[in-house]
Amino acid sequence: MQDFVYYTPTEVVFGKESESQIAALVKKHGGSKVLVHYGGQSAIRSGLLAKVESQLKEQGIEYICLGGVVPNPRLSLVKEGIALCQREAVDFILAVGGGSVIDSSKAIAYGLCYDGDVWDFFCGKAVAKAAMPIGVVLTIPAAGSEMSDSCVITNEDGDIKRGYSSNVIRCKFAVMNPERTYTLPAYQTACGAVDIMMHTMERYFSPDTDMPLTDALAEGLLRVVKDSAYRLLADPQDYNARAQIMWASSLAHNDLTGCGMKSDFATHKLEHELSALFDVAHGAGLAAVWGSWARYVMDANISRFEQFAVNVMGVSPSDDPRATAIAGIEAMEAFYRDIDMPVSIKELLGREVSDDEISLMADKCSRDGSMIIGSFKKLDRQDMVNIYLAAK
Amino acid sequence: MQDFVYYTPTEVVFGKESESQIAALVKKHGGSKVLVHYGGQSAIRSGLLAKVESQLKEQGIEYICLGGVVPNPRLSLVKEGIALCQREAVDFILAVGGGSVIDSSKAIAYGLCYDGDVWDFFCGKAVAKAAMPIGVVLTIPAAGSEMSDSCVITNEDGDIKRGYSSNVIRCKFAVMNPERTYTLPAYQTACGAVDIMMHTMERYFSPDTDMPLTDALAEGLLRVVKDSAYRLLADPQDYNARAQIMWASSLAHNDLTGCGMKSDFATHKLEHELSALFDVAHGAGLAAVWGSWARYVMDANISRFEQFAVNVMGVSPSDDPRATAIAGIEAMEAFYRDIDMPVSIKELLGREVSDDEISLMADKCSRDGSMIIGSFKKLDRQDMVNIYLAAK
């Protein structure tokens, strides 16, 4: 096992009554002039934005609003947000939405404490020393950004999607009311479940071994998200199932399920090129490539995939570890199909991906061949091409 | 399920190399004049205290030392520590030890930010608004105090052992090197395992239902602590087993394994009277009464004990839920015996407990009959007597 640091300072306020505390939490964490950052019409239609605004007014906290965040959040809006916050002397950012809104808020928060171009962080030219404080009112459980150290932004100039991680960006608080997710379309609920599970699977498929506590937490979380996704197919307003998924979204990506393990975010990196190029939903993109990644790398440690098959997917152990491992991957793909997620790029896009497009994605993912990804099995540019081809 | 707040701001630095960062962490968290608080000779003999002191000197951080904390830490030393810190203008407390040292440090930290008698917090006369910051170098995994909001102190005037919990006392950081626990005697290792598991079991046996994520995390943690305790019987220097127990000690009591569940700390409360009266090891006291508590309350929700039996203790499910539940309790008692823990008060004390002593403990535990404990099943003074008698 690896030495590790575990740092999750975010105060989570979870449940049906949680939203009554939003403005009090802003105040507690020092906000006096707030940017309320959100996405599209749903935050308005649901009445959540009005609720936030009236609470801030009641508490005498000044605020301005900036909407318009889209999935795969754009650098241009981040820059607009930074300029707006500078003009208005904002000292706290309140993200009202899902991962895209939180990540756009995080990028604004980085930019407000940095003199240069905020993109510097995402292309490795700068290390963040500080960030403006952020609070979250979560409406879409998926990205786990409310408790994670990560932030992913898309630079429209070249369709480049890049992540940057730092402990300085951990949110001060996260308000989570599972009832807010009742109205999520089934497709988005499914994308969320895939993303949540992947955050833990990419910690679970590690070259490290003998960290049974982390394994048990990861396996338990994966089983519960899967079961809860099935419950929501039957009843989208199953409060407890919504609650499991929402809480799992935070725990799956706040590092808990990876303590002591070297992680392997290759599937996320392979997917980032898909969503940057085709603007597809991130969770669906992950489902489309994971099985191909898994079959490509599994022989690096077949017993790990065997353990996953038995402990997570409920496959009966057999004398043939490889057969058990493959049965586990197939069971996961069957789950993806059950919740209407694609298991190939063709199913994702509704058409064949071309060899040129695969070549372009592999170029970008490998930084023109200069970068290796993964740790369970290290993958170079040709490996990426092979996995994209297998997922074709 | 219940609404909940989850707040674990402690920065955990875990592993073989973690101790190199102690002074840097003190500095990062604002310490300039430090009280190094510890227990007996082991911190000196092991060289840990010297390591801490040399690091603080190197970083130019002033410090004073106060040793002498004993198991079931005493109010008198807490008051001595408060007076010392006031005289010396201490602004940070570094606890070097296990739960007793951390709790003594926490009580000092409360006292330094309060004008009245620090015991006020423990007898319900005051609510803490602030506390001096604390860091921990953990040497005994058991109490979980390094990440919990709790603090338990014994007032020698009347042998009264009382707890007080507040989020203001959560530690700033915890340095955990599993190698430090190699030299723990088997008895202390076993006491730790019992205490760790109990912190999670007292969240698990809840009147709340359908929180499968919390259940899965709790069940996984319990299985791993049990397995690791067996590994340590075979090899006390099994690093990975030591690491599981150490990390579990924090996770078992930082609220993770109780999110959404009403807890039931009746066993802890019943035990506090045992260790206050007889000064026995806390973990051993818990083992001595748990089985009797479990049999006394199980019919309040037999399916919960059935689930525990199957998912934690590995009992095969049967058509008779009650038989399965009892088999689970028996399996836990068998585990206690395997690790040389008592399963009755007689085994704990080496003699019969008298009816007068039971009556005295029930008086104190129930505040002379005025207090009910427990939530899985509510227990009054007579219930407490019945459980002590069953555990006799």
Image: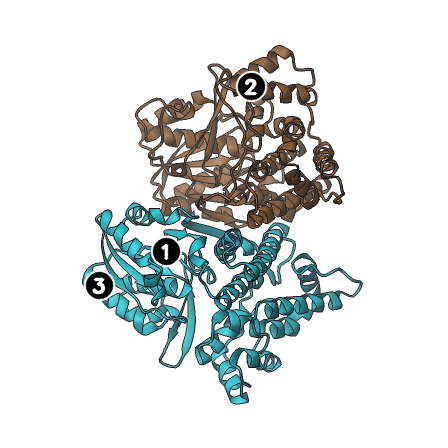
Chain colours: A brown, B cyan
Instruction: Name the residue nearer the viewer: B377 or A292.
Output: A292
Label 2: which secondary element: helix
Residue A381 image label: 2
Instruction: Name the residue nearer the viewer: A291 or B59.
Output: B59
Against B166, residue A384 (above or below) is: above
Direction from residue A62 to residue B266 in the image, left or right: right
Q: Quick one: label 3, few (<14), some, or many (20+) residues within 10 Å?
A: few
Q: Quick one: label 2, few (<14), some, or many (20+) residues within 10 Å?
A: many
Between the C-alphas of marks 3 and 2, the distance is 63 Å
Residue B231 horizontal/vertical position (percent): 57, 58
Instruction: Name the residue nearer the viewer: A317 or B332.
Output: A317
Direction from residue B7 to residue B385 in the image, left or right: right
Residues beneath discs 3 and 2 located on the same chain: no
Residue A357 horizontal/vertical position (percent): 60, 13
Amino acid type indicated by mark 3 = Gln
User: How many labels, in total?
Assistant: 3
Viewer-nearest of discs 1 and 3 = 1
Residues beneath discs 1 and 3 located on the same chain: yes
Task: Name the image quarter holding the C terminus of chain B.
Answer: bottom right
What residue is shown with label 1?
Answer: B136
Residue B247 horizontal/vertical position (percent): 49, 53
Q: Quick one: label 1, few (<14), some, or many (20+) residues within 10 Å?
A: many
> Dividing the picture into quarters, in which one does residue A389 lie?
top right
What residue is shown with label 3?
Answer: B86
Label 3: which secondary element: helix
Residue A129 horizontal/vertical position (percent): 33, 34
Q: Earlier in the sequence, mark 1 or mark 3?
A: 3
Can residue A38 be seen at all in this image of the molecule? no
Instruction: Name the residue nearer the viewer: A261 or B84.
Output: A261
Amino acid type indicated by mark 1 = Val
